[in-house]
Image (cartoon, grey):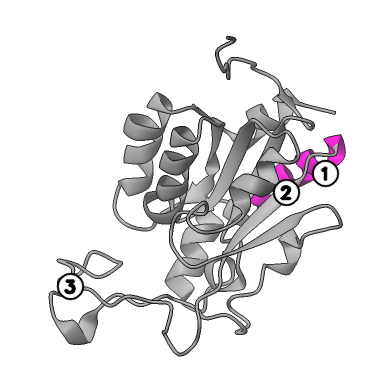
Amino acid sequence: MARISRLEKELSAQRTGLIMFDSLNGYLHPRDPNKVKFLEERNILPNLQRLLGGARKVGMNAFYPSGAHTPDGSDTVARLTDTDMDLGATGEASKAIKPRFYAGSEDSKIAPELAPVEGDVVIPKHRWNSFFQTDLDLQLRVRGIETIIIAGGSTDVGIASTVFAARDLDYGIVVARDACFSARGNNNQFFMERVFPRMGRVMDVDDIIALMRA
């Protein structure tokens, strides 16, 4: 019986899917000026646009796992945690972590610069992991996709959770280093240098595009 292999270096449109993780207005067009500056300094939105453009050019499908939390909080579990999402002290029931944005809001819509086109797939999700109780795995497998390219944020939250799951599901993985982000200390660097390289390839957008094939 042949063993599964994910050793192909090139990224063919037939066997590769682009994961545009939480490419939402609220994250890419934040109201906080400090967050706007943070994204601009790292060229995040232009890098995402360039990556998506490269995929479009070779006919590669894009998949958009997007937070779709209910406004009434009925799909959210409140729990005690040591910190809030920005690593500030908490531990109080009144400060339980809640979703940033809710379905139906302007913030929860996909940023217009990255809007899906015909053939792309939007995946509503309710947890960090894009595969958890969604049909992302099904949508990839029915298309014969064996490798994913993943970009977006936050690196240390949804990107990490999704990459761990993708590895356990035996996908080949390419992480777009300069199209992922986290504003929490050196978390982005830590994952890019110490975690993701053991599960797949970590590459800059231009290097990824250079490997894309129709």
Q: Is residue 138 left or right of residue 52?
A: left
Q: Is residue 47 visible in this depiction of the protein?
A: no
Return the disc, 2 or 1, that comes first in the chain's sequence. 1
Residue that appears at 55% across and 32% down? 171
The answer to whether the residue labelled 2 contacts the one labelled 1, judged by CB atoms less than 8 Å apart, is: yes
Residue 195 percent across, percent down from the top left: 34, 33
- Magenta stretch? 48-58
In this picture, is 48 found above or below 128?
Answer: above
Circle 2: residue type: Ala
Q: Is residue 67 left or right of residue 83?
A: right
Q: Main secondary structure of the magenta part?
A: helix
Circle 1: residue type: Arg
Gap between marks 3 and 1 measured at Cα? 43 Å
Residue beneath disc 3: 80
Residue beneath disc 1: 56
Residue beneath disc 2: 62
Secondary structure beneath label 2:
strand
Gap between marks 2 and 1 measured at Cα? 8 Å
